[in-house]
Amino acid sequence: DTEVTQTPKHLVMGMTNKKSLKCEQHMGHRAMYWYKQKAKKPPELMFVYSYEKLSINESVPSRFSPECPNSSLLNLHLHALQPEDSALYLCASSQSGTGPKGYTFGSGTRLTVV
Amino acid sequence: GEDVEQSLFLSVREGDSSVINCTYTDSSSTYLYWYKQEPGAGLQLLTYIFSNMDMKQDQRLTVLLNKKDKHLSLRIADTQTGDSAIYFCAESPNSGNTPLVFGKGTRLSVIA
């Protein structure tokens, strides 16, 4: 299995809703990442988990809450989002650190906040 | 800090070669990568080059690395309409101990 699977593919939520994005990989990767990507922009790093511990938080607002329940799963809990949070949310994984295989990305969740 | 620069747009005719350029800043980067992103999709690793190489060829793709000038390029031979996408250059700074740094992406349009 050489994939990163993200669900749901699309999500529309109101500003008072609570929702979660899910990411799963079974490649034995020990680093997992959340990125946010606005239209026509590069991905922006949000969080990094290394060996199931949060190692990097790029000053992301607390309305985004990551969770890594085990080495294969990564969640992003969303609460009280703003319309400007609408974006493509990408999950990625890698062996610890970077190497020739770089990061493997999921297809993303297209989030719309109304 | 690290910064990766790319030109934003490139338009080529089908069958021609495309060359996408990138400059990076961290001379300790061990690997440099090219990712492709099609509309509505995630990023797909196309190829990589190790920092002690100056060229790598993989079918229609040729990567050139000029480490002195910190310049990376991706050449796509016989460009097809299916190659239309955004191409991101990325470096692994600090010998791979910090996350990848992506360029802003080059949007390649292939005209039939």
Image (cartoon, coloured by chain):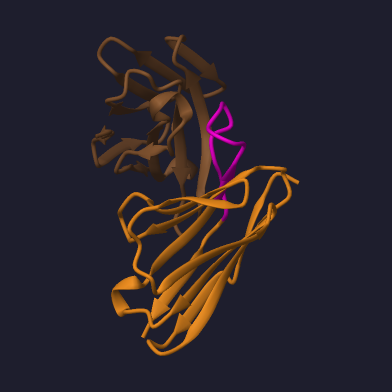
Vertical side of A23 occupied by B55: above or below: above
Region rendered in magenta: A92-106
Judging depth in this view, the residue of B38 and A99 nearest the camera is: A99
Tell me if A112 is positioned left or right of A39 in this view. Answer: right
Tell me if B45 is positioned left or right of A40 in this view. Answer: right
Vertical side of A24 occupied by A98: above or below: above
- Labels in figure, total: 0
Residue B27, image quadrant: top left
Colour used to depict chain B in the structure image: brown
Residue B89 among magenta residues:
no
Residue at 36%, 40% (x, y): give it: B102
Give the x, y percent position of residue A10.
52, 73
Residue A94 among magenta residues:
yes
Q: Main secondary structure of the magenta part?
A: loop
Give the x, y percent position of residue A16.
41, 90
Residue at 34%, 22% (x, y): give it: B72
Residue at 73%, 49% (x, y): give it: A26
> Could you say which chain is coloured orange in the image?
A
> Is any atom of residue B112 visible in this view?
no
> Is any atom of residue B63 visible in this view?
yes
Vertical side of A77 occupied by B67: above or below: above
Give the x, y percent position of residue A31.
58, 44
Residue A74, image quadrant: bottom right
Q: The C terminus of chain A appears in which quarter of the rendering?
A: bottom left
Judging depth in this view, the residue of A9 and A100 nearest the camera is: A100
Judging depth in this view, the residue of B65 and B93 nearest the camera is: B93
